[in-house]
Amino acid sequence: MIPSPPLTPARHALRGRAVTFGANPFLDDPARALVYEPDALILIEDGRIARFGAFDALRDTLPPGTPLTHWREGIISAGFVDTHVHYPQLPMIAAYGEQLLEWLERYTFPTEARFADPDYAAGVARRFLRELLRAGTTSAAVYCTVHPHSVDAFFAESARLNTRMVAGKVLMDRNAPANLRDTPQGGYDDSLALIDRWHQRGRQLYAVTPRFAATSTEEQLDLAGSLLRQRAGLFMQTHLSENLAEVEWIRQLFPRRGSYLDVYAHAGLVGPRSVLGHGVHVDEDSFHACHAAGCALAHCPTSNLFLGSGAFRLFDALDPRRPVRVGLGTDVGAGTSLSQLQTLNEAYKVAQSTGRRLHPVQAFWLATAGGAHALYLDDRIGTISPGMEADLCVLDPGATPLMAQRAEQCETIEDLLFVLMMLGDDRSVRATYVAGQMVHDRDAPAG
């Protein structure tokens, strides 16, 4: 179990440098989109942000006796949002030598088979959420395994921590080992029971989760679409056009469909709150279809580089003429870190390889407000403003000697953000707050 820091009072305040967003920096000038307060006051009441602004302007409005934490060297940000991650793959992160389809067979499926043991699932769920919070990630769209108790284990731990999470049981009735397959009706029944048990219970949200088209029959995909119509506010998550061999396999399995995306659209799976992982080999017609449907793509640069899948065309996806919702995903285990800072490091390099420059303001928007927008949760998380849920992280630009030396040369907040995304990792997260409660303190004594 994650050790719990001392209970934070229901009303308290934070002071320090703060960054958030007033606009999408892919559609507006990054300098205008960024909201930077060099000495901010954030008043938190009952898990929500009550006031945010310049300290000098708000200090006299603080209710008497309000505890104040001053993060003098830190930068306060909304908590990071991870739009595509597999918690059961944490034990096999950094598995050597394969591309996507071979990697699934050799590493992923054997690892996920261990989740037949409920105690094992519970232990990994605890470790996974602890690692997310150490990395400053406060919300994520999470794949569990085919086992219903893997979902129960995840949501139970998330509910204990009061994190806002989206998760679901993987649906997989073909092209997988027998011990990891369900059936169309069994997967439907298990998912519906999990939805009734967890969806919108506190801060937990359910995602219907067909792994990808190759591991579900058309009957299962159709029933997944039916599930989405059973309850309000459900999510859908799956994979799309990650690897060229995978794309060709889908074409052979579904010869009557016009594209990989059309496989999902035909089953009623493409719409608002649908999150499609990777999208490396998406064509212009599919970008248009994603824009029209209001679905999102999860950009997973560490995974795409690790498996040699290709370079996601971020700026094409976000073309102002038909912008697609895009968030950032760590993926794990094909991804190499749960840190969104390290993921932004690779996103910058992927953009450079396609002839584009990812501005640090754009990068941090992807990891916070953009991820929330991709998940249709931007009315609750992803920015610092009154009424929002108080999910925050405090970043330390001097976390290592190298970072501290580089930070001394920075003249603007944009420079500091770039240092954080290029040199930072979980050590750069000084503290993490969930619904106003401190759930991670990097410098707290161990034990």
Image: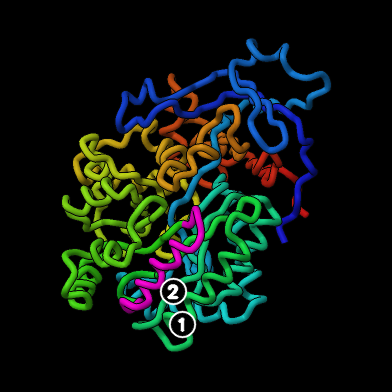
**Tag 2 residue:** 171
Residue at x 28%, y 56% (from the top left corner) = 279
The image's mark for residue 90 is: none
Task: Report the quarter where the N terminus lies.
Answer: bottom right
Note whether residue 336 is visible.
Answer: no
Q: Are marks 2 and 1 in contact (CB under 8 Å)?
A: yes
Residue 167 highlighted magenta (yes or no): no
Report how far apart the C-alphas of labels 2 and 1 lie in the structure: 7 Å
Q: In this view, does 439 lie above or below 358?
A: below
Name the image quarter holding residue 175.
Answer: bottom left
The image's mark for residue 182 is: 1
Residue at x 42%, y 60% (from the top left corner) = 236
Note whether residue 28 is visible.
Answer: yes
Magenta stretch, residue numbers: 216-234
User: Amino acid under label 1?
Assistant: Asp
Name the image quarter holding residue 277.
Answer: bottom left
Name the image quarter holding residue 385.
Answer: top right
Residue at x 36%, y 83% (from the top left corner) = 174
**Secondary-structure class at tag 1:** loop
Q: In this view, does 233 lie above or below 403?
A: below
User: x and y percent of residue 201 in the render?
Assistant: 64, 56
User: x and y percent of residue 317 in the render?
Assistant: 25, 45
Task: Report the quarter where the C terminus lies.
Answer: bottom right
Q: Which of 418 and 85 is in front in this view?
A: 85
**Secondary-structure class at tag 2:** strand
For residue 11, side relative to residue 28 (left or right): right
